[in-house]
């Protein structure tokens, strides 16, 4: 496809989660041919070795408590490099449009007349599913599934009534960025669905502290746990299937299926 | 990794959706080295050209109204080939554990002592998101998101009250395999969220009939439409963001962002 000779383009690439090999073929190809790669804290670092020699690598991640670059700065940086004629890859953890804010970056660039496209990535809950045999959705045990973040746009934590409403409407509910409200989730799960309801937690998936464990919402053990971020909290259908059918694979970071 | 010389393994691979290049790097590698590939109707056929010469290709898809192979037959076929020492890839459209029944196949194989692993894939709603700039989830406009199928395990369609409960609990609700209940969805969206609520529909994503369009739940136009399967129906947050910010990209199959 031709493009104006003086203007580059922006490609927002989902790096996926869990394993570096979970990036898409098209995503990797974009990485390999980029002039500039602007990457996130959550994007697997191992992927950067695929950059071509001479490519410029820019870190734009936000570590908790540290501000490296504001969203506005990142938007402008993408635009600036593209306007200089570069093929710019913006590498993000997981999927760019699944709690990834890729839409803001792409829209900013498009509104300034620069081409932008997005390549999807495997979000962390789907990586968890494949690595630990936790089927997120399937007829019978998990016909509906809901995803929510632990904090609302203003930064306030998700309320008890919102947690309850989600638990009452979908068979499986998955909370991301929600370790702060873990106790609320477990207590609401026990009260709306009964103390035996299954809860599965994955901490630091793909990282050095990867740990996956299962518990029952009403158990003493469930309340004693304190998951560390980043974590995924799965309640109901999918977690129940995993505990009942595949506990040795799903509920332990050491016993696995046929995994590397 | 070593394996017993006489027993093969099963790798369940999500082919992804939307574009053949959306398969993962690890998934493509598994395809390339497979002795046997058992593939689905929904898996992009273009991927099969990556099979190595001599690989055996077996079609196991279920066309509507035609039974080619039962789930039990597929389970047994996977096991049989692996026991003969083959490296067996089971290629499925989308993600194997997101309404894909990959868990049944993997569990069957594991229970018979054969290694099984799963490689995730991009589910069709995420492919839609990236291709048409429809951000599925993001703080502010779509803090929570729910996915549901149009039919329950017994084959009965999702009821009005279940549709309503989903619409009342999550900002964005995505229905898959739900063209039969399209009218119920639109009517419930108009009554629970108001006639201006945004609805976005993607038909045959990645196929020859790919068509994406937007409407308002309470409009006359919305009720005149009859989406054809396979389709994805997006109600609320994500569709609203797309209509308000990126209508020319999100609501038309011809105008696109920077896409091939």
Image (cartoon, coloured by chain):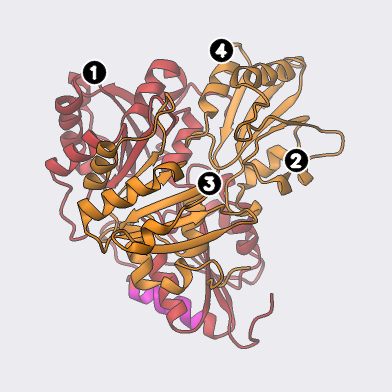
Chain colours: A orange, B red
Q: Residues within 10 Å of mark 3 (few under 14, many from 20)?
A: some
Same-subunit check for callouts 4 and 3 = yes
In the rendered image, which quarter contains the N terminus of chain A?
A: top right
Q: Which chain carries label 1?
A: B
Same-subunit check for callouts 1 and 3 = no
Which SS type dominates the magenta stretch?
helix
Residue B156 x %, y %: 15, 54
Q: Mark 3 lies on which chain?
A: A
Is residue A232 toward the left or the right of residue A38 in the image?
left
Query: In this figure, which residue is indicated by the disc labeled 1?
Result: B196
Query: In this figure, which residue is indicated by the disc labeled 3?
Result: A229
Query: In this figure, which residue is indicated by the disc labeled 4?
Result: A111
Q: Is residue A30 magenta?
A: no
Same-subunit check for callouts 4 and 2 = yes
- Nearest to the observer: residue A231 or residue B251: A231
Q: Is residue B48 visible to the viewer in this orientation of the structure? A: yes
Same-subunit check for callouts 2 and 3 = yes
Query: In this figure, which residue is indicated by the disc labeled 2?
Result: A32
Going from N to C along the chain, the mark reached first, 4 or 3, is 4
Per the model, the C-alpha gap separating discs 2 and 3 is 31 Å
Same-subunit check for callouts 1 and 2 = no
Going from N to C along the chain, the mark reached first, 4 or 2, is 2
Residue range highlighted in magenta: B72-81
Residue A26 x %, y %: 63, 42
On screen, residue B8 above or below B31:
below
């Amino acid at each position: 496809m031709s493009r104006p000779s003086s203007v580059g383009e922006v490609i927002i690439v989902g790096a996926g989660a869990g394993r570096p090999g979970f990036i898409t073929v098209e995503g990797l190809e974009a990485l390999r041919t980029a002039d500039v790669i602007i990457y996130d804290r959550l994007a697997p670092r191992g992927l950067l070795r695929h950059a071509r020699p001479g490519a410029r690598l820019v870190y734009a991640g936000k570590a908790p408590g540290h501000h490296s670059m504001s969203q506005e700065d990142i938007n402008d940086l993408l635009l600036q490099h593209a306007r200089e004629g570069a093929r710019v890859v913006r590498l993000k953890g997981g999927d760019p449009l699944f709690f990834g804010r890729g839409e803001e970056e792409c829209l900013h660039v498009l509104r300034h007349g620069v081409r932008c496209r997005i390549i999807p990535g495997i979000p962390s809950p789907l990586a968890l599913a494949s690595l630990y045999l936790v089927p997120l959705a399937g007829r019978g045990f998990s016909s509906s599934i809901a995803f929510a973040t632990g904090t609302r746009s203003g930064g306030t934590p998700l309320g008890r009534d919102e947690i309850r409403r989600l638990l009452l409407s979908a068979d499986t509910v998955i909370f991301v960025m929600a370790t702060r409200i873990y106790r609320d989730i477990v207590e609401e799960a026990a009260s709306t669905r009964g103390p035996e309801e299954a809860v599965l937690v994955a901490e630091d998936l793909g990282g050095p502290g990867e740990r996956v464990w299962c518990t029952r919402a009403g158990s003493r053990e469930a309340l004693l746990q304190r998951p560390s971020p980043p974590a995924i909290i799965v309640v109901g259908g999918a977690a129940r299937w995993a505990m009942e059918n595949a506990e040795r694979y799903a509920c332990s970071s050491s016993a696995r299926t046929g995994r590397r």
